[in-house]
Image (spheres, helix red, strand yellow):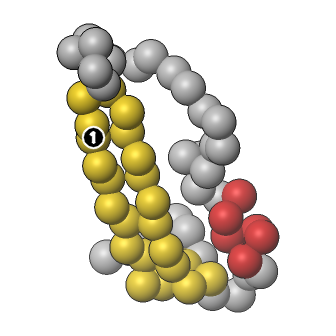
Amino acid sequence: MNAPFPVTKYQSTIHVKEDTDGKTFLVEWSGSFNPVVVSDEVAIKLFPWNLQGWHGEYF
């Protein structure tokens, strides 16, 4: 697999949980990887979903 990110061994998990109101969902996305040629900090910033406290309605 080729990707524009300088990382290897990328693995992610997505969990979608229905909220108690039955109208909204909580999405938990976690991932791990090994940076290549760049620092951990630089690699982490390359992933746009690295947004702590991010909330949005896109669906």
Q: Residue at x 48, y 84 (%)?
A: 8
**Number of dots carrying numbers:** 1
Where residue 25 sits, quadrant-wise, is top left
- The image position of residue 35, as x and y in percent, is 62, 82
Residue 58 appears at what percent x and percent y? 41, 19
- Please state the horizontal and vertical placement of residue 9, each as a whole percent of the image: 42, 84
**Placement of 44 over or under 37, stated as above or below:** above
| Of residues 40 and 30, the one drawn nearer to the viewer in this rendering | 30
In the displayed structure, 25 sits above or below 46; it is above
Question: Where 8 sits versus 27, above or below?
Answer: below
Q: Relative to 46, does residue 22 appear above or below in the rendering?
A: above
The residue at the point 77 percent across, 80 percent down is 39
Residue at the image position 55 percent from the left and 46 percent from the top: 49
* Point 59% across, 76% down: residue: 6
Relative to residue 14, is residue 46 drawn left or right? right
Q: Residues within 10 Å of mark 1 (few under 14, many from 20)?
A: few
Q: Nearer the viewer, residue 4 or 56?
A: 56
Q: Where does the C terminus fall, quadrant-wise?
A: top left
Residue 8 vs residue 57, the one in the foreground: 57
* Amino acid at dot 1: Val
Report whether 49 appears left or right of 38. Answer: left
Q: Mark 1 points at which residue?
A: 16
In which quadrant of the rendered image does the N terminus lie?
bottom left
Quadrant of residue 45 within the rendered picture: bottom right
Please state the horizontal and vertical placement of residue 43, each as a whole percent of the image. Answer: 67, 70
Horizontal arrangement in the rendering, residue 33 relative to residue 38 (left or right): left
Callout 1 secondary element: strand
* Residue at the limit of the structure toward the front, as seen here: 20
